[in-house]
Image (spheres, rainbow, N blue to C red):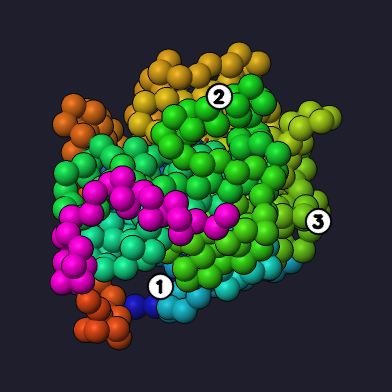
Amino acid sequence: MNLDTHSFPNDPNRPRGRPRVVIIGGGFGGVSAAKALAGAPLDITLIDRTNHHLFQPLLYQVASAVLPSSDITRPIRRMLRGQANVRVLLGTVVGIDPAQRVVQVDGGAESRHPYDYLIVSAGLVHDYFGHDEWARLAPGLKSVADAEEIRRRFLLAFEEAERTPDIDAHNEFLTFVVIGGGATGVELAGILPATARAAMRDDFRRVDVADTRVILLEGGPRILPAFNPVLSQKAELYLGGLGVEVRTNTKVTRVEPDAVWAGGERIATRNVFWAAGMRASPLGAMLGVPLNGRGQVLVEPDLTIPGHPEVYVIGDLAALRWDETRWIPQLAPFANQAGRWSAANIVRTIEGRSREPFRYFDKGMLATVGRHKAVGELRGVRFSGYVAWWAWLLIHILYLAGFRNRLSVMLEWLWGYFTMDHGSRLITSPVPVTEDSAAAVPLASAGEPASLRSSERTRLRRESLPK
Ligand SMILES: Cc1cc2nc3c(=O)[nH]c(=O)nc-3n(C[C@H](O)[C@H](O)[C@H](O)COP(=O)(O)OP(=O)(O)OC[C@H]3O[C@@H](n4cnc5c(N)ncnc54)[C@H](O)[C@@H]3O)c2cc1C
């Protein structure tokens, strides 16, 4: 049977000739838009290159082995299965032709998707500022695959430290460098030592998890630049309490397999994580309209693009002024609200009404530091410490997709809170085999005790640090 591109095999009674909406992206913006169009007389195709919606705010908890990735993801198909006017397709969009009103998907039989209305919510990608070669050495945190790779490296570092007979290598394995002092960098830098010391205590014989060293590098004058300076200071104080070394005004100039060069200094480490930069998905540039310096689409006040009132760009990919001095922050609330707003504007259009300019409702900002502290601000009101952490916890539970995920995360956090035990310490790919592993001489046979005392290791590590 030769199916017309817009026939739904599941719905033979589908009315013909309804306007077609293509949504690119099943993240916050795309799913909100699709849900807001429930019941509308439209045929919607939502395309994503992954099969799951991802709750990115909790990615750092997957990266640090606190939560399993299944707790913060949900199949997009499952989220929209009750909505008869939506069809979900797995595929990577490789082209958009606004003149022909067609979206091109990579490979497969059904690769061309004509539309009457298009909503693009494809988000951001990592930006290594012209050093793409760093990506291999310093993975960033944006997808499930990224988080699982960071988790693998984090857990493997302790395993390698336990095995290595070389004290310098031992110290390098226990040194973690996080590049970028925005919310992602701060959350990651705070959770790594907290998790290591709480969940891995007593697990090793030669590794003392108290020796875990985390360095947070920030090129600008303060961490959390999007927050009030008072909260930046608070966060730095909290990180200091966790033993995290925060270095501001420190630009990274080189990343090597066993070192990072920053501020003219060589930091010996085997673990580097990237939280320094993001830029827009390349799909934005395919629309042929003005972009900002990060490749985000400068959208009209009603979220459409210049010259194409049928094309909406929303979420992280869109740049829209909040007021004369500020841009709307690239946060989940903007993507959610813009998704619903673009849907409402499409409905207004098909009903013959005019589109309305987007109005942003500020829901504030929060960032956690370690296991039980956070900083946050909402419309000029600042809060921090335990209170902010509770607010963070409740909000994240509330906004997680799916009751199963909410329950599971709550149980996981409760269990971790009382037992300090986290259930996601999985290294799922084989441990790399090094050529010199056969030649390595064990510490014990070199006349040293099998278990180095912590103080001794710390002394040796300090001596190995660059002066
Ligand atoms: C680590 C991290 C922590 C964060 N923490 C917070 C927080 O605490 N609070 C907060 O409010 N915000 C937070 N954010 C930001 C928030 O997640 C984003 O603002 C939000 O996800 C933006 O939604 P979106 O729909 O624009 O993009 P996304 O949610 O990124 O969704 C984009 C979707 O498009 C798909 N896609 C991309 N390219 C293609 C293509 N070519 N073909 C098909 N599909 C494609 C992707 O697979 C993805 O599903 C965080 C982000 C990160 C990375």
- Disc 2 residue lies near ligand 1 with CB under 8 A: no
Q: Position of residue 143 (x, y in %)?
A: 43, 56
Residues under labels 3 and 2: Cα distance? 38 Å
State the SS at label 2. helix
Is 33 drawn above or below residue 362 in the view shown?
below
**What's under tag 3, amino acid-wise?**
Pro
Magenta part of the chain: 442-467
**What's under tag 1, amino acid-wise?**
Leu
Tag 2 residue: 234
| Residue 186 shows in the view | yes
**First of labels 3, 2 by sequence position:** 2
> How packed is label 2: few (under 14 Cα within 10 Å), some, or many (20 or more)?
some
Residues under labels 3 and 1: Cα distance? 37 Å
Q: Is residue 204 magenta?
A: no
**What's under tag 2, amino acid-wise?**
Lys
Q: Is residue 384 left or right of residue 52?
A: right
* Along the viewing direction, whichever of 369 and 438 lies nearer the viewer: 438
Residue at image location 45% in from the left, 19% down from the top = 385
User: Pointers 3 and 2 in contact (CB under 8 A)?
Assistant: no
Residues under labels 1 and 2: Cα distance? 60 Å
Tag 3 residue: 290
Tag 1 residue: 3
